Image (spheres, coloured by chain):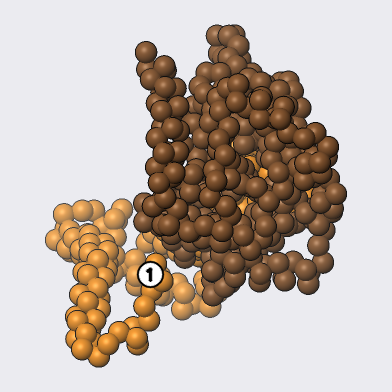
């Protein structure tokens, strides 16, 4: 956990700050149980997300990574520390959402067609009809569903519905794209295909992403930095750089020697956590 | 999951497709055979029992006898006009009461679900009065609304109100919370939240309430007409029984059943129209 703080300390203070999309400092989240006990779900969470960067939040189930993402999405409150969006402020004009979320479970609205699903996502942005239509066309094409734009979610497969959710989030052109295990409900083959798709989409849209996952290989495949979280309370244990560059291929990246080495390192960290918890 | 249009299947497999379609048709015919055949069998047994003198035809006239009475009645112009008047009297009470109850129930139910003070204030009253048989309140309604149509329509409104209110409340409360998360995470405006997210997500349950309300409405309107009326199908049935015109009584029952059947078919059509995404 020292690595996290030292990494921030070494950062040249002024120069990079303009490039930051989000800064989280000393974030804390408490729960009060039914027996009036206070449980610390998140403790002293500090990290920064640079523009155009993909950050993975990695940790075993129950370590608070989804809670952290819900806080960033504005779906949950926090009890200490601060979240500073102002660093990405110059990007944050009225035509973008501060953060858009892709959820783990299917979150398409079954009573409206795909185009209207995207429109609901953009409804808070006061865009002209023409601009809405243009964004729908663009982002539906990016997720490869152009021919289904008039179709309804129940006519699509699970993977296609998740692509609709991704398009809905992308269409708000968010300062930060939040993804909560978006591929975990898909089968293994579809997941690998979708990982490649995500890399391609992020590159086309220059997205800044916080990506929650419990899958080590997925974190390494997709992210520029991996934030490893501990359990009870959820703290940052380590922040690892992933030196593969943004222009990568899902299959090639897995063949690299340093991929294997990083995977083992991360696995050891996570195993410690799970082991500690089991004892 | 996209269905392959049959035209695109290669020619070689056409006999296979035809065989599958034939099997499906056979299966459907079999189902319909039972659904139509069994009621007919019951009628036939009734007819046989009446013909054989096993039941007293003064109280249980044979189905053919009832059919004959019905046809004769409907062929006599003044009789026919009388029955139409009874039918219209019942329908007007039914439709007015139903629409009023449904609109009120949905508005109150959805508002209760979304607005806590409203819910906390009204829920105890609604749940406490829900189990009361609505017909027991009918005398009170007569005191308030008088002996005319208003008290009967009000009784229907009351019954439909409870069904739609409680189902709308539950519909919003137990809708998948992911839809509310979407509304909040994407910071959608209030109007979008209400009309594109909250109400549609509760629609399956609201429609269930509307369908249950149909049954309630029919029970209540006929009961009210039994007790206090000079017209309507309930009065027609009750009056026929009191004058021991049993065939006419059965005719009244059949008309009520037909009205109910049409309403249920309409309810199912409404369901398919409003919630095409739900599995039926």
Question: Looking at the figure, which quarter contains the N terminus of chain B?
Answer: bottom left
- What is the crowding at mark 1: few (fewer than 14 residues within 10 Å), some, or many (at least 20)? some
Residue at mark 1: B69
As drawn, B107 above or below A3: below
Q: Position of residue B223 (x, y in %)?
A: 53, 46
Task: Name the residue rendered at 71%, 44% in the picture.
Answer: A50
Q: Residue furthest top?
A: A36
Q: Position of residue B13 (x, y in %)?
A: 21, 85
Task: Name the residue rendered at 56%, 61% in the picture.
Answer: A200
Task: Name the residue rendered at 48%, 54% in the picture.
Answer: A195
Of residues B20 and A131, the one nearer the viewer is A131
As drawn, A196 above or below A25: below
Q: Colour of chain A?
A: brown
As drawn, B64 above or below A49: below
Q: Position of residue B226 (x, y in %)?
A: 53, 47
Label 1 chain ID:
B
Of residues A211 and A166, the one nearer the viewer is A211
Q: Label 1's element?
A: helix
Q: Is residue A30 left or right of residue B211?
A: right
* Residue A83 visible to the viewer: yes
Of residues B58 and A230, the one nearer the viewer is A230
Of residues B33 and A59, the one nearer the viewer is A59
Q: Is residue A86 left or right of residue A48?
A: right
Find residue B171 and report its image quarter.
Answer: top right
Task: Name the residue rendered at 62%, 32% in the picture.
Answer: A68
* Residue B151 visible to the viewer: no
Question: Looking at the figure, which quarter contains the C terminus of chain B?
Answer: bottom left
Q: Which chain is orange?
A: B
As drawn, A94 above or below A131: above
Q: Position of residue A105 (x, y in %)?
A: 50, 46
């Amino acid at each position: 956990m020292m690595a996290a703080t030292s990494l921030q300390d070494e950062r040249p203070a002024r120069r990079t700050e303009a490039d930051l999309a989000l800064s989280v400092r000393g974030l804390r989240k408490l729960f009060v149980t039914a027996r009036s006990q206070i449980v610390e779900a998140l403790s002293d969470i500090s990290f920064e997300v640079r523009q155009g960067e993909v950050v993975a939040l990695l940790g075993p189930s129950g370590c608070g990574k989804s809670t952290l993402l819900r806080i960033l999405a504005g779906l949950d409150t926090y009890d200490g520390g601060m979240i500073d969006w102002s660093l990405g402020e110059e990007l944050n004009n009225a035509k973008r959402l501060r953060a858009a979320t892709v959820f783990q479970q299917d979150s398409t609205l079954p009573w409206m067609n795909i185009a209207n699903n995207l429109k609901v996502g953009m409804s808070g942005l006061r865009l002209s009809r023409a601009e809405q239509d243009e964004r729908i066309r663009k982002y539906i094409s990016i997720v490869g569903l152009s021919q289904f734009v008039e179709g309804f979610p129940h006519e699509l497969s699970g993977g296609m519905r998740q692509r609709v959710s991704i398009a809905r989030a992308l269409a708000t052109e968010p300062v930060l794209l939040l993804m909560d295990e978006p591929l975990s409900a898909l089968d293994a083959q579809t997941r690998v295909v979708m990982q490649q798709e995500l890399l391609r989409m992020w590159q086309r849209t220059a997205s800044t992403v916080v990506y929650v996952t419990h899958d080590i290989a997925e974190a390494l495949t997709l992210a520029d930095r991996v934030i490893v979280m501990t359990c009870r309370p959820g703290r940052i244990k380590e922040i690892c750089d992933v030196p593969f560059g943004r222009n990568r291929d899902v299959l090639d990246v897995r063949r690299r020697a340093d991929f294997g080495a990083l995977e083992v390192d991360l696995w050891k960290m996570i195993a410690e956590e799970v082991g500690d918890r089991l004892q | 999951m996209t269905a392959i249009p049959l035209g695109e299947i290669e020619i070689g497999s056409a006999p296979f497709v035809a065989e599958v379609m034939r099997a499906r048709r056979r299966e459907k015919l079999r189902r319909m055979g039972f659904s139509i055949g069994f009621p007919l069998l019951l009628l036939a047994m009734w007819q046989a029992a009446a013909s054989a003198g096993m039941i007293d035809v003064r109280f249980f006239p044979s189905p053919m006898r009832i059919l004959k009475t019905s046809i004769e009645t409907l062929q006599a112009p003044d009789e026919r006009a009388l029955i139409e008047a009874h039918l219209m009297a019942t329908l007007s009470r039914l439709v007015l009461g139903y629409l009023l109850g449904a609109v009120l129930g949905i508005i109150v139910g959805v508002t209760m679900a979304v607005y806590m003070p409203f819910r906390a204030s009204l829920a105890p009253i609604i749940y406490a009065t829900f189990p009361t048989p609505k017909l027991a309140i009918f005398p009170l309604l007569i005191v308030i609304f008088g002996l005319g149509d208003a008290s009967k329509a009000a009784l229907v409104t009351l019954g439909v109100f409870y069904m739609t209110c409680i189902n709308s409340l539950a519909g919003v409360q137990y809708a998948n919370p992911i839809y509310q998360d979407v509304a909040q995470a994407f910071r959608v405006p209030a109007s979008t939240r209400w009309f594109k997210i909250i109400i549609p997500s509760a629609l399956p349950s609201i429609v269930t309430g509307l369908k249950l309300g149909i049954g309630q409405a029919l029970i209540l309107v006929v009961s009210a007409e039994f007790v206090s009326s000079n017209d309507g199908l309930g009065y027609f049935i009750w009056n026929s029984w009191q004058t021991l015109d049993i065939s006419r009584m059965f005719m009244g029952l059949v008309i009520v059943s037909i009205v109910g059947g049409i309403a249920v078919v309409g309810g199912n059509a409404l369901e398919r129209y409003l919630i095409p995404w739900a599995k039926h």
